[in-house]
Image (spheres, rainbow, N blue to C red):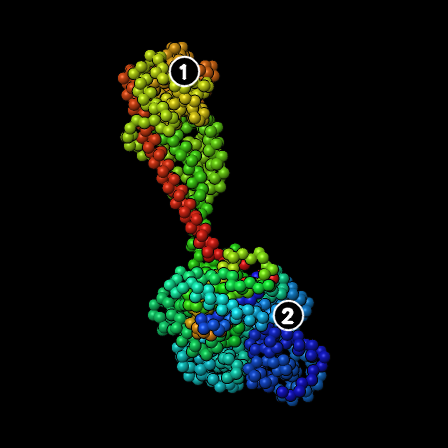
Amino acid sequence: MAVCVAVIAKENYPLYIRSIPTENELKFHYMVHTSLDVVDEKISAMGKALVDQRELYLGLLYPTEDYKVYGYVTNSKVKFVMVVDSSNTALRDNEIRSMFRKLHNSYTDVMCNPFYNPGDRIQSRAFDSMVTSMMVQVC
Amino acid sequence: MEGLTLSDAEQKYYSDLFSYCDIESTKKVAANGRVLELFRAAQLPNDVVLQIMELCGATRLGYFGRSQFYIALKLVAVAQSGFPLRVESINTVKDLPLPRFVASKNEQESRHAASYSSDSENQGSYSGVIPPPPGRGQVKKGSVSHDTVQPRTSADQQEPASPVVSPQQSPPTSPHTWRKHSRHPSGGNSERPLAGPGPFWSPFGEAQSGSSAGDAVWSGHSPPPPQETWVSFADTPPTSTLLTMHPASVQDQTTVRTVASATTANEIRRQSSSYDDPWKITDEQRQYYVNQFKTIQPDLNGFIPGSAAKEFFTKSKLPILELSHIWELSDFDKDGALTLDEFCAAFHLVVARKNGYDLPEKLPESLMPKLIDLEDSADVGDQPGEVGYSGSPAEAPPSKSPSMPSLNQTWPELNQSSEDTAIVHPVPIRMTPSKIHMQEMELKRTGSDHTNPTSPLLVKPSDLSEESKINSSVKFASGNTVADGYSSSDSFTSDPEQIGNNVTHQRSHSGTSPDNTAPPPPPPRPQPSHSRSSSLDMNRTFAVTTGQQQAGVVAHPPAVPPRPQPSQAPGPVVHRPVDADGLITHTSTSPQQIPEQPNFADFSQFEVFAASNVNEEQDDEAEKHPDILPVEKASDSASSLRVAKTDSKIEEKTAASVPANVSKGTTPLAPPPKPVRRRLKSEDELRPEVDEHTQKTGVLATVLASQPSIPRSVGKDKKAIQASIRRNKETNTVLARLNSELQQQLKDVLEERISLEVQLEQLRPFSHL
């Protein structure tokens, strides 16, 4: 269902970005890049005092004509950005949330791997397979 | 590489073989896997094979490119033809027959013949190249294994020609590998003298040196570039290739599934699983792993932290990416630490990887922490695909249950218990209403007659059957569903089951009889208060009426006896108090009011009858009857007159019944009450408005007469009535307590169920996505 999935590190560089190869990937990269501003905006809007209460799921960052971009940020300021096709109207918010939850879980598992150095690109096969499952769903 | 000219047949043959060996379609074939098998199948001496390897350049490259592979095949043909192996001989030898691969030929044929069909274990479905015909290979290997210099009994194991066994041999040799790596960092030819142990793998004793050939083989399996030791598969016992095949097949399954049909994939899986899992860890290996574990973590039940494990496995010189993948596979519970089982799995994977086996996508079944100790991996039959879930981020799944691949070892207890409890718990709850009902019945009886619990019930069931159907309808459904598997510690549940199963007198008896003894003697009633039946306080009524006795004056003709039954109901009800608590009290109000539940009225009379019968057998019971009767009579409007009128009749009947009862009195069984009941029924029919009380009175009179110990005096009656009332109240409180307890139970179970459902929801992989 997702057209593009990206994991952005705290310093705003991508740890993992993957999109459906049939499309122009650069476009998705650009969308993800621009969405970072929106993410930062949402984070700062919460206020510093509310960091703990801040919800991890940011919701719809911004919609475009063809796509919608959803965001999710962890407590360590690692951001997940997901681009979904607008035509996929059946996607509910709950589903997006669950997808982000899966992402977060997989990301945590990657972090738990002692052979993974935080800040490296994520090359975990398990993570890949999980993202694939999210992307190759309805489309 | 020298130019290689191939004839068309050769070209085709070679390309087929290359495709066969090129598992991953990378256009280059690692020196392990099918290539080894192929060369084995060529039935060439090991050193020849090594030479071929070297000549074709694979040793330099560390792998077989297509050209290398072709050259190698050509050289095989050359060797098989008896020509000396020369680089030049590739092109110089003309009319070279195609290289003969005993097994490979068959493989080829089977491949062609049964494309993507897996009709025999020797065929796998392959999308292109994949699955090995392990059977064939193994058969070959069985024969070739003699060549392998296995230090262990692996050779013996192989002899049985069971493919299953062979894979196990390689793992034992893996320790060799470690050692050899360190010892033979530099490439070399086939035979490598066993040097001293490597730095970190030194724990490996020399004991495993075994044959040098075998050793040499393993040394080649380090990452290709730095070591040109790929060549040394010569002695790689067929097991290694076999092993490769198996893991390859294991891996391939994931790919196969995407390409081949599901059936073929299943078959492949079955094949691999039936081959007793190449990933199985032998005892030797396990012992070695355990020892290694101890060096890091002395406590075998403890964990190895991720950092220590990282350090340890980094020594194996595998690329970090692969180590990372191995970690992902082996850290079953994703806690960043390795338990003993996880460590063994990781170690095994590292060893396998070092030997050239590709890492599986998912953790093989035999390596799953829960299964490592199991020797029967074949059972788990669960396809490695299923196993693969274990690698998923979510709770690792235990592949034990095919139906729930996503369940991990951490789950089984939870699931089983939850399922069982979830399934079981609701059942009894539903049963409780009926159960309480039966309980009441029973209590009534116990209240009245401890030794004859069944009789009242016998009487009741007939009515009960009517009314209980109301409850039982639910009970039946629930009971039937539950009755099967539900075994609750609560004795009460047994009743519902019984009730649900069959609404028969006997059943009710059996169901309730156990409970007869269950309710402890009811504590003294707090106060005489009428139960829920109505606003009328029958106690008061009775108290009033008792005084009036047989004055015939119905102090309160509260409710017009609307129907024969209701009118009769009070009679039995009143009598009933001796036997049953609430019901009797309830029914007792009936004469004064239209009974809220005709049911009660229905069986109340029977109860009364039964009670009367019972009473006949019991002194105390009998004592109450006269007390009750007068009360009933008093309460009934026509009691006095009727009493006189019906006495005779009653006496007749009771006389008839009494003997019957008396005869059977000692045995609280169904039969006795029935005849009485019938007679009473007929009586009732005859006199719809008959004062049952009078009947009862008559009966009681008879009973009393039969039991002279029970005087029929007003005072006694009063006392008896009060005693009965007290008892009824006691049973009432007991029932109330029971009810509250069951309600509490119900709540608890529901909560538990909700929590389990929530857990299930959280833990279940998001399959809908």
Nearest the eye: B725 or B247: B725
Of residues B181 and B542, the one drawn nearer to the viewer in this rendering: B542
Look at label 1 and name its amino acid: Asp
Query: Which of B585/A66 is in front?
Result: A66
Query: Which residue is drawn at the image coordinates 43% and 51% (left, top)?
Result: B756
The residue pinned by badge 2 equals: B128
Would you identify the image quadrant in which residue B532 lies?
top left
**Can residue A127 be seen at all in this image of the molecule?**
no
Under mark 2, the amino acid is: Gly
- For disc 1, the chain is B
Question: Circle 2 marks a residue in which chain?
Answer: B
Determine whether B445 is above or below B209 in the image: above
Quadrant in which residue B311 is drawn: bottom left
Specify few, some or many for label 1: CA neighbours under 10 Å numbering under 14, 14-19, or 20 or more: many
Residue B567 in view (yes/no): yes
User: Gap in Å between the C-alphas at discs 2 and 1?
Assistant: 95 Å
Can you tell which of label 2 and label 1 is closer to the viewer?
1
Q: Position of residue B456 (x, y in %)?
A: 40, 26
User: Which quadrant holds the N terminus of chain B?
Assistant: bottom right
Residue at image position (63%, 82%) is B67
Q: Position of residue B308 (x, y in %)?
A: 38, 73
- Report the quarter where the C terminus of chain B lies: bottom right
Kindly identify which numbered label has been placed on residue B457: none
Q: Is residue B378 left or right of residue B711?
A: right
At mark 1, the secondary structure is loop
Q: Is residue B646 above or below residue B25?
A: above
Frontmost residue, B737 versus B645 = B737
Element at badge 2? loop
Location of mark 1 (residue): B691
Q: Position of residue B358 (x, y in %)?
A: 53, 73
Question: Which residue is located at x 47 percent, y 34 percent?
Answer: B472
Q: Position of residue B42 (x, y in %)?
A: 61, 77
